Image (cartoon, grey):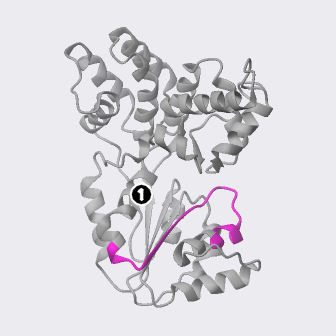
């Protein structure tokens, strides 16, 4: 498999085994919002207050800017959970299936696992399920206004104070889905906010050692205020976090990789890939075969890695599965795969 044959990008692994859940946590979902506190208060006010008619709140930002983490924090806020009767979260990928999206939203708001085969009937059932209820729906990572047109008729416009949040990288999509609230452009982290995030992810509650203070500030500046870039850099740095020379090496590598703003996250992903052990590189590249935003069951992924021959020199099948899970844990630890 060629290193250039598949796109390198952060991937999401879903439905982990209990064993895996006990071994890891998602670095992007240690949901502490750095730099977005005032923004969060503003959006929460829009969700809890304002007119009773349905409102759509577009959140716009480039890849890696923290849109999903920001909205997830709002979605899980105790006051928000208490305020709304039902909630649903749905990822809208570039290639989507209308029926699957409607089914996912219906299952979340109804608490049912029942399947409806006919898309028109499903859209109507969902609408009736939401009627007269105060609902919050998140449509995450919308790429095309057509996705909104395919879904919007299932969201009743009753005077219940319901809200829909749409996250998107595209300002034009934000403008087209908005109702009362103008698209909200998520800001970049300031230098100090980026440094604080870097410090927390590398050293937790401890401060930077004196010998690392200058170089850590330089690394934070090179991350250009993008939370995902910082998270990826942490995955590279923390293996040798006390070595000043390693920090300088990462800083200099960032300078050579980072170009136009839209390429920051992907460039840092390439840097993360370059610093992986050779045994892990084909495992990460293999994830590029899945659609963007796909949630990949761990059991399926491990079986595929073994079938492809990525796990070698292991005698028994059980040991191969354990080795493959160790590979996955190493990728999670490097922050290139998230659970």
Question: What residue is rendered at 59% in x and 33% in y?
Answer: 328
User: Where on the picture, by quarter, is residue 145?
Assistant: bottom right
Please tell me which residue lies in front, 204 or 196: 204
Please tell me which residue lies in front, 292 or 242: 242
Instruction: Inspect the magenta stretch and tell me whether residue 63 lies in it.
Output: no
Q: Residue furthest top?
A: 245
Relative placement, left or right, of 221 versus 14 is: left
Question: What residue is rendered at 42% in x and 35% in y?
Answer: 231
Instruction: Inspect the magenta stretch and tell me whether residue 90 lies in it.
Output: yes
- Vertically, is 221 above or below 80? above
Viewer can see residue 339: no
- List x then y, in percent, for residue 287: 67, 38
Instruction: Bin the neighbour count of mark 1 within 10 Å (Cα to Cα): few under 14, some 14-19, many 20 and up.
Output: some
Q: Where does the magenta region start and end?
A: 82-103
Question: What residue is rendered at 33% in x and 31% in y?
Answer: 198
User: Disc 1 marks which residue?
Assistant: 72
- Vertically, is 115 above or below 247? below
Instruction: Please state the total of marks drawn on the protein image.
Output: 1
Please tell me which residue lies in front, 332 or 233: 332
- List x then y, in percent, for residue 290: 70, 45
- Vertically, is 335 above or below 132? above
- List x then y, in percent, for residue 125: 63, 85
Relative placement, left or right, of 315 versus 127 is: right
Viewer can see residue 254: yes
Please tell me which residue lies in front, 154 or 61: 154
Question: What residue is rendered at 67% in x and 44% in y?
Answer: 299
User: Where on the picture, by quarter, is residue 126?
Assistant: bottom right
Relative placement, left or right, of 331 versus 195 is: right
């Amino acid at each position: 498999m060629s290193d250039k044959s598949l796109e390198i990008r952060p991937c999401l692994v879903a439905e982990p085994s209990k064993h895996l859940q006990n071994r890891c946590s998602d670095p992007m979902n240690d949901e502490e919002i750095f730099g977005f506190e005032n923004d969060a208060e503003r959006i929460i006010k829009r969700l809890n207050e304002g007119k009773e008619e349905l409102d759509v709140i577009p959140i716009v930002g480039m890849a890696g800017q923290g849109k999903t983490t920001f909205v997830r924090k709002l979605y899980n806020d105790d006051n928000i959970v208490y305020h709304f009767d039902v909630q649903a979260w749905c990822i809208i990928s570039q290639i989507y299936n209308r029926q699957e999206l409607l089914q996912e939203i219906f299952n979340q708001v109804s608490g049912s696992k029942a399947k409806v085969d006919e898309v028109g009937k499903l859209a109507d059932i969902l609408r009736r399920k939401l009627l007269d209820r105060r609902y919050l729906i998140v449509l995450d990572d919308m790429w095309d206004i057509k996705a909104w047109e395919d879904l919007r008729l299932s969201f009743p416009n009753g005077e219940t104070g319901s809200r829909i949040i749409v996250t998107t990288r595209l300002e034009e999509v934000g403008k087209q889905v908005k109702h009362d609230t103008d698209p909200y452009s998520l800001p970049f982290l300031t230098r100090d906010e980026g440094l604080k995030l870097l410090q927390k992810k590398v050293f937790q509650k401890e401060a930077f050692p004196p010998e690392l203070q200058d170089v850590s500030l330089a690394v934070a500046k090179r991350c250009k205020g993008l939370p995902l870039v910082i998270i990826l850099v942490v995955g590279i740095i923390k293996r040798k976090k006390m070595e000043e020379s390693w920090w300088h090496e990462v800083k200099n590598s960032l300078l050579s990789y980072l170009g136009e703003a839209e390429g920051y996250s992907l460039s840092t992903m390439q840097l993360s890939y370059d610093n992986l052990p050779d045994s892990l590189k084909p495992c990460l590249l293999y994830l590029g075969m899945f659609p963007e935003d796909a949630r990949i069951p761990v059991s399926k992924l491990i079986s595929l890695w073994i079938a492809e021959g990525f796990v070698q020199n292991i005698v028994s099948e059980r040991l191969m599965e354990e080795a493959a899970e160790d590979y996955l844990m190493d990728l999670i630890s490097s922050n290139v795969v998230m659970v």
